[in-house]
Every structure is written in structure tokens, then in C-alpha cells.
Image (tube, grey):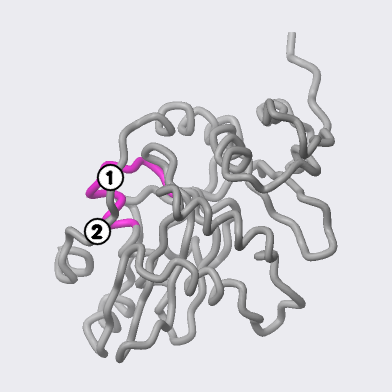
Amino acid sequence: MRPEQARPVLLNSTDPSLVFPDPLHAESPLIAVGGDLSPERILQAYAQGIFPWFGEEDPILWWSPDPRGVLKPDAVHISRSLRKHAGTGSWQVRLDGDFAGVLDDCAAPRSGQGGTWITDGMRSAYLDLFAAGHGHCVEVLQHGQRVGGLYGVAQGALFFGESMFSRVPDASKIALVWLAKHLSYWNFGLIDTQFLTPHLQSMGAGEMTRAEFLQHLALLKNQPTPHAWQAFLSWDDVFWP
């Protein structure tokens, strides 16, 4: 008999159990409302395939979409135009450099968007995750200036992508390729993109059902990951293997 589908639950911010409902049988992408943004709660959410996403005026909202946007690190697509562009200009890429700066650039106003979901509370929470070794970022620099990047959280051999930005053409694509190639080198199995956008689809991302994603998560979340994120691959290894 199929278990009764769970509806979104109201979390208590003082509840020490940090228990989320099982998203496998949720009837909507919204899993829970409320709680807090402590590193412990966010990591527990990721461990169950759930992530926080809400606006300035909203309560804390916890999501697990179905289908789920994903990218396999070894399947990232590098178009001929991107490969050509990567070979020109003064590009530099850093891993885990200025996490706060990447976070702020991702939160900056963008054309066509009314606001940001990276609230002060979210910013503080992910800075704590970075300080604890769970948060990571990629910076793309040109002539010494940061022009693109992304950040997210690693749990086991799965990387949960949170946001990316680009100030010049292809900068966020270069960041994603750099990330994917290193994650593949480190035997990561999946990049969670949460949702599938045309931009991500052009880079090789696709979708899987929530059930499939949770199966992958169960296998990957407890696998070992690098203790320190450093760039082991050269530019040529990344873009011209």
C-alpha cells in the first residue's frame, strides 16, 4: 500500500530534532515552512534532498522539486564557441577564494528580477557553512576583477549548486565547467541544479524524478570528499582534454 502523501509541515525553530518530513511522498514541491537557518538544519535538509528558498517577505520555505534539475560532472557540455572564448582573454579561476564576495555578487540586483532570495539570514547561514568546510565557491576573474562565479554546498560526493552570476559573456559557464571538471576528477557523482533552465540545459544538465534523485543522494551523500578544495587540473586539462 502506498504511504499517505505528506503535506507541507510547520517547523518549530526551537525543535532540537531538526526532523523534516520524507519528501519521497510529498504531494507538492514545498516540503516544510518555518524553522531556522542553522547550519545543522540546512545540512539535514540537504541530506534529505531539501533546500531553503524564499523571498524577503516570506517565511522560511523548504523545497524538494519533482522533477529535479541535475548535471553529471563528467557530462558537462563545452560548446565550440565556449571553448574558443575560453582560449581568449585573461581568464583566471579560483576555488574557495572570496566566498563572501561571490555570495554578494550572486545576491546583487539583476535585470528583470524584483529582488533576491539571498536574504541577510541566508547570507549569514551560508557563510557559516563555508567556515565549517561545507560551502564552496568558484570565481572567474578577468584582468584581476571578478566577472563571474557560483557557490553551493558539498555533501559527500554530491554538490548542491545554489546560485551563479555573470558580468561578461560566458563567465558563469566557465565557472560551471571548471567546477564540473574538478568534481569529476574528485569522483563526485552529481551536481544538483535544483531546477532546469535553458542556460543549464545548454551545459548538459537534465532532469530526473524526485525518487531517482533521492536514490542517488542516498548513495553519494556519505562518500568521502576532498578536505581542501584546490585546483588540481590545468586550464588545458579543463577545456582541451
Q: Out of 104 and 162, give the one closest to the viewer.
A: 104
Side of 199 relative to 90 (left or right): right
Q: Position of residue 43 (x, y in %)?
A: 55, 40
Q: Which residue is mark 1?
A: 226
Residue interval drawn in magenta = 180-191
Side of 203 relative to 181 (left or right): right
> What is the C-alpha distance between the residues marked 2 and 1?
9 Å
Amino acid beneath label 1:
Pro
**Residue lying at 47% horizontally and 27% vertically, measured from the top left:** 218
Side of 61 relative to 49 (left or right): right
Q: Is residue 8 visible?
A: no
Q: Position of residue 95 (x, y in %)?
A: 32, 64
Q: Is 184 within the magenta?
A: yes
Q: Position of residue 42 (x, y in %)?
A: 60, 43
Q: Which residue is mark 2?
A: 230
Amino acid beneath label 2:
Gln
Where's the C terminus, which quadrant? bottom left
Element at badge 2? Answer: loop
Above or below, 196 relative to 87 = above
Q: Out of 66 and 167, give the one closest to the viewer.
A: 167
Q: Which mark is residue 129?
A: none
**Residue lying at 24% horizontally and 88% vertically, measured from the top left:** 88
| C-beta proximity under 8 Å, tags 2 and 1 | yes
Side of 192 relative to 238 (left or right): right
Mark 1, Cα crowd under 10 Å, few <14 / some 14-19 / many 20+, is few
Q: Is residue 110 visible?
A: yes
Total numbered labels placed on residues in the image: 2
**Residue lying at 68% horizontally and 26% vertically, measured from the top left:** 17
Q: Out of 25 and 125, give the one closest to the viewer.
A: 125
Element at badge 1? Answer: loop
Q: Residue furthest top?
A: 1
